[in-house]
Amino acid sequence: FLDGPEQAYTGDRCLTRSVLKRYGYSGLLAAAWRPPTEPLDEGFREVTSPEVRKWIENARELAQKSDGEHPTVRSLGAVSMRFESLRGPRSLENIRSMEFSSLSNFQKSREELRGPLEHDLFRGSDLTLEVVAVAEVRHAPPRVERRSDRLRLSCAFNLREGIASPFRIVNVEELLSEVRDGEFHDSDVE
């Protein structure tokens, strides 16, 4: 299990750092800015769900409508991502929520754990990671956009192998998008 996080970055079957960099949040935004007629990179298709590809398609159409005949040049400024949540196999959640006092009723606890443990051992389940990403996007001068999106990544997980498939971006939820002419002026926080 402890090898799982490292596998997520270096394993043959898992998303590597270069793939994360290319197809992560920055890549997602870059794909959304391309013209609707330009096909998605085949690698991008492999690491995104149909729902995310639809989100990209809608973003491209919206950008084309707002840009008109002259596509806006966009460049990515600052980008940051923060961990929000991790959800995984029911068996691990059950074990984690067990209290020491329940060990006295081990037979009852064992029966409650048996089903989820067998399922997660032989069939597996999804491991879901959610992150919130923020970016500052420079449009053709003088416009600047600040945006925040929640990304949900998912992979197969089982108790034998740990992470058992590549992570895929399965959902994108726009939390905030604010566009201004000129720069944003953040007040100093003390």
Image (spheres, helix red, strand yellow):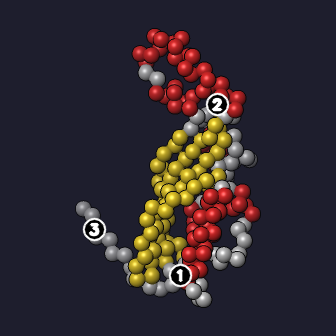
The answer to which of marks 2 and 3 sits earlier in the sequence is: 2
**Residue at figure coordinates x 53%, y 72% from the top left:** 76
Amino acid type, residue under disc 3 in the picture: Asp
Q: Are marks 2 and 1 in contact (CB under 8 Å)?
A: no
- Res 30 seen here: no
Quarter in which the N terminus is drawn: top right
20, 119: nearer the viewer:
119
Foreground mark, 2 or 3, reads 2
Q: Which residue is mark 1?
A: 66
The residue wearing badge 3 is: 188
Q: Kindly state the secondary structure of the residue where label 2 is placed.
A: helix
Q: Give the position of the C terminus as an image quadrant.
A: bottom left
Q: Earlier in the sequence, mark 3 or mark 1?
A: 1
Residue 11, image x, y percentages: 70, 45
The answer to whether one can see residue 86 in this image is yes
Mark nearer the viewer, 3 or 1: 1
Element type where label 1 sits in the image? helix
Q: Amino acid at mark 1?
A: Ser
Query: Residue 88: x and y, percent?
Result: 56, 38
Q: Inspect the image, locate mark 2, and give the three-letter code of the amino acid beneath it.
A: Asp
Check disc 3: other Cα within 10 Å, few if <14, some if 14-19, many if 20+: few
Is there a contact, CB below 8 Å, between mark 3 and mark 1?
no
Label pair 2/3, CB-CB below 8 angstroms? no
Q: Residues within 10 Å of mark 1 (few under 14, many from 20)?
A: few
Against 58, is 10 above or below?
above
Coordinates of residue 156 in the picture (x, y in percent): 66, 41
Classify 6 as above or below 114. below
Q: Position of residue 4 (x, y in %)?
A: 62, 39
| Residue 120 marker | 2
Q: Secondary structure at mark 3?
A: loop
- Decide which of 75, 70 is in the foreground and name it: 70
Kindly indicate the quadrant of the structure image that contains residue 145. bottom left
